[in-house]
Image (spheres, rainbow, N blue to C red):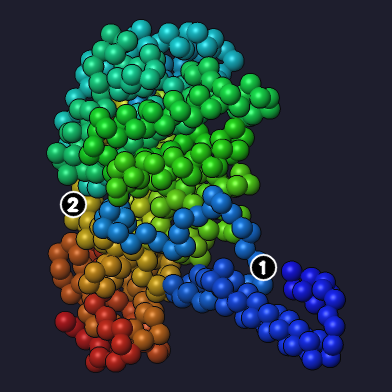
Amino acid sequence: MIHKIITGPKIRGIKARAQFAAAAVTVLCLSLVLTVLSPTNLQAQWGEGGKKTEIKNDKKEVPLKHGAHRIGKRTDPEMDRWRDYGLGEFIHFGLYSILGGDYNGMHYNGASEWIRSWNKLPHDVYDNLYKKFDPKDFDPEAWANMARQMGVKYVTITTKHHDGFCLWPSKYSDFNITKTPYKKDMIGPMVRAFDKAGIDVYLYFSVMDWHQKDWRYDLKTAADTVAFNRFKTFTKNQLAELLTLYPQTKGFWFDGTWDNSWKKSGAFSDSLDQYLKKLHPGLIIGSRLRADDYGNRHFDANGHLMGDYEQGWERKIPKDYAATRGNDWDCVMTIPENGWGYAKTWLGHWKTPYELIEMLAKCVSLDGNFVVNFGPKGDGTFRKKELQTAQQIGDWMQVNHEAIYGAGYAGWEKQDWGYYTKNRKDGKIYMIVFNMPINGALKVVPGKKGHIKNAYLLQDHKNLKIEKLDGNAVFIHLEQKLQPQPFVIVVEATMDGKALDTENKHV
Ligand code: FHN
């Protein structure tokens, strides 16, 4: 455009030419200033220590109609509450729970909830499983109780997985629970039981729906587009239905949004996001729902998060704070290696409660929530191993929850003994210790201006000896032999650069 202004019009007369040149230079300078100062050209870089530095980026932002709605975190009370959860529970329950990964004496090696896609199991056999769906021993209060004892603050329930089977009486699909021998709604009683137990409820919803004839993986023909438009309306109706039936819902956990058909529907998913939030103010939706104008998911073409938190951490945890890009995020984790629905046989390694607690500590230390998945059996009860895992996590949380709830990234230099977390409100620092050094001395290097004032064990509030090292680093000495389980030390520190007399201090 500037090029056009300079070379385009024919200018007569010296004065006019001089005026024009001056105007062109002004336009050029202004646009340069705007380009450099525009927020789109100042990007945040996240480094260890939680330092956010603005870096200049000459790359121009791509204009988008359906990009991120916001740069930076949501700051409303609903999202603050989400951020403080720390620990969550995921539940995968559906028709696949009946088979438990086995069919006709054969074992399916994939995740059991995907068994319908196995070429050894005919689709019509799977789709008729609803005739056998009768979780007689389902007790929503018992499910909520187990979650409460485990110490979870939120639960995500599968309302409909990829197979399209609805655990609620949807008037938009016949493939729903009322057609089963069980007949009754399962989602309502679950929502109410969890809500009563003080656990926030999120609804898992798979957009991809293998049962709907209008579902398409891609849109290659005009007929595909027509069918998929019907599918979009169906999806929107089901979601509105869920919010109407279960107003306690705090958010949706979307899945099955990776196919081209959905990636080409960025305008629709954008409007759907806005529609649902209007219908249900405060609703929380992660980054799996939307696609931008170019089909990018999670992050738009300019690298901005499209959603209220990043939802890409499935069975993996960011390696450090920089990898989180300073966003809200959650990690969803299976207890066996892979597989979310019930599998009669857990092949391979299954994570121990302490392994899961270490993952929880790592997630919270990096400002994320950690969500452990459970796959109840077809009769509606949990396998023993899952009950024991929940119980042991709960026992640990009972003593140490202070280091998890309302806590996040501390910004102190990571040490090999474990993870720091920091309470967002009072700034208390927690050390969650997993690897005890042989000399019983835990090195702590607080941020530049930090000075350790006091340290005590969370489990019994016994004060610990602090030994001063170089600079403001210290050793915290454990003088008692602790159980071989993760424990927490609470650290009180000043962060204003003022040193306190802590040398060899027994407090
Ligand atoms: O395919 C699903 C899988 O079955 C499970 O529901 C997980 C949970 O995060 N999500 C999908 C894959 O991303």
Density class for disc 1 (Cα within 10 Å; few <14, some 14-19, many ≥20) is few
Q: Position of residue 207 (x, y in %)?
A: 47, 31
Look at the numbered disc 1 and give the secondary structure of its residue: loop
Q: Nearer the viewer, residue 436 or 130?
A: 130
The quarter of the image holding the N terminus is bottom right
**The residue at label 2 has a CB less than 8 Å from ligand 1:** no
- Name above or below for residue 262 compared with residue 211: below
Look at the numbered disc 2 and give the secondary structure of its residue: helix
Q: Amino acid at mark 1?
A: Lys
- Which of disc 2 and disc 1 is earlier in sequence? 1
Q: Is residue 289 left or right of residue 248?
A: right
Q: Nearer the viewer, mark 1 or mark 2?
A: 1
Q: Nearer the viewer, residue 137 or 484?
A: 137
The numbered dot on residue 398 is 2
Q: Position of residue 28 (x, y in %)?
A: 70, 80
Mark 1 → mark 2, Cα distance in angstroms = 49 Å
Q: Is residue 435 left or right of residue 459?
A: right
- Name above or below for residue 180 compared with residue 259: above
The quarter of the image holding the C terminus is bottom left
Density class for disc 2 (Cα within 10 Å; few <14, some 14-19, many ≥20) is some
Q: Nearer the viewer, residue 427 or 196?
A: 196
Q: Is residue 227 left or right of residue 396?
A: right
Q: Residue drawn at (24%, 83%), measured in percent from left and top?
A: 453
The numbered dot on residue 59 is 1
Q: Is residue 109 visible?
A: no
Q: Residue drawn at (79%, 70%), measured in percent from left and top?
A: 4
Q: Residue drawn at (35%, 45%), measured in percent from left and top?
A: 277
Q: Amino acid at mark 2?
A: Gln
**The residue at label 1 has a CB less than 8 Å from ligand 1:** no
